[in-house]
Amino acid sequence: MTVAATFEIEYLQYLGPDGKPVADFPEAFANPETLLPLFKEMLFVRIFDTKSIALQRTGKLGTYASSLGHEATHIGIGASMRPEDVFAPSYREYGAQLMRGVHPREILMYWGGDERGNDFEVPRHDFSWSVPISTQCLHAAGAALAFKLRKEPRLAVACCGDGGSSKTDFYAALNSAGAYTLPLVLCVINNGWAISVPRSAQTGAQTLAQKGIAGGLPCLQVDGNDLVALMEGMRRATERARNGEGGTVIEFLTYRLHDHTTADDARRYRSAEEVKAAWERDPIPRLRTFLTARKLWDEQQEKAWAEECGKRVDAEIDAYLASKVQPVEAMFDYLYADPPADLLKQREAAIALEKRS
């Protein structure tokens, strides 16, 4: 028998769920102090997320997609990018966006139904939120192609979920990245569930990382709750892209500890035993244990930091709540630079209807 091809998928993990190292740290992260500011950002994201859910429950926010359990994945991705790079998020990567300079109030405005939450003050060149899954992967591929044609030392990073990795948009993006050696990093955040559809029901692939092989891209599978593994995986991918060697597909294994959104009830499709087991792999206690063992963190520091984070988030919430509600016609103003005639008629009708109400 002649074998046409074989492949292996490397798996990265350096910190076990108990917070103890399971392998020697990469040289770039050998000093554990480098992880401390990133851990603090993870805590900030969790506090922001908790307060955002409370805001939704009290009717001051629309449907909200929690990032609970994804903190390490998001912070690792955001921390690995440079300001001039371009990020194409889905609708849940708050940690990465905060690391990129997006304000918490902008996130709240988006989920409050205000389009100004899509118009980031910083970074202006990142793509806006994408609720249609995986369409942002093609946008990122287009940006990466522009960087290559212009000979700019920049890269594009796109995030999608496990369900999104089964979409044609994802495959088209990775195929383009392979064919044209694009500086594109495709991050598949595998939290086990495409809303209510388990990973096993939407793909027969042994790993999601291996999907990149079809496009000729290097692939990695990473423990998405291990910040060290995340940073190392992203370091490899971004260095490869910046060196003109092309794109990478990285599968981050994590778990969505909350419902898909506040409009969802995950108890209908997930067992309590599964969720309990996932909590034992929570990325925050894992890194907290590691840093505490090295005398870089303690309860007093965490209490003080939590108080500071709470004040910062409350100030952002106040700014969001104080923002002036846009008039009804604003919904038309974000669609076209030059609206067609029929849309202008709809806009006029909406204004007239609001005046009568």
Image (cartoon, rainbow, N blue to C red):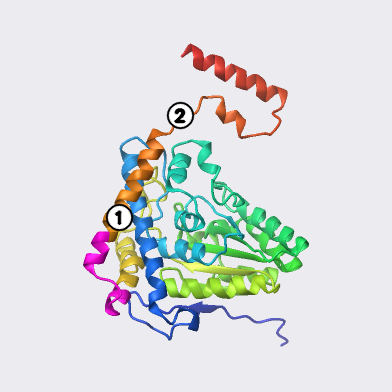
Number of disc labels: 2
Outermost left residue: 300
Task: Look at the image and give the residue range highlighted in magenta.
Answer: 289-304
Q: Secondary structure at mark 2?
A: loop
For badge 2, the amino acid type reads Val
* 122 to the left or right of 171: left
* 65 to the left or right of 183: left
Q: Residue at x 54, y 63 (%)?
A: 188
Mark 2 neighbour class, 10 Å CA radius: few under 14, some 14 to 19, many 20 or more? few
Residue 305 spot, x, y in % from top left:
29, 60
Mark 1 neighbour class, 10 Å CA radius: few under 14, some 14 to 19, many 20 or more? few
Q: Residue at x 50, y 17 (%)?
A: 354
Q: Earlier in the sequence, mark 1 or mark 2?
A: 1
Q: Residue at x 39, y 67 (%)?
A: 37
Is label 1 in contact with label 2 (beta carbons under 8 Å)? no
For badge 1, the amino acid type reads Glu
- Magenta-colored stretch includes residue 290: yes
Distance between mark 1 and mark 2 Cα atoms: 29 Å
The image quadrant that residue 320 belongs to is: top left
Above or below, comparing residue 297 to residue 310 in the picture: below
Instruction: Give the labeled residue for mark 1.
Output: 308
Instruction: Give the labeled residue for mark 2.
Output: 325
- Magenta-colored stretch includes residue 118: no
Residue 34 spot, x, y in % from top left:
42, 74
Residue 18 visible from this viewpoint: no
Nearest the viewer among 345 and 117 is 117
Q: Secondary structure at mark 1?
A: helix
- The label nearer to you, 1 versus 2, is 1
Residue 107 spot, x, y in % from top left:
46, 45
* 36 to the left or right of 354: left
Residue 337 spot, x, y in % from top left:
69, 34
Q: Residue at x 53, y 74 (%)?
A: 233
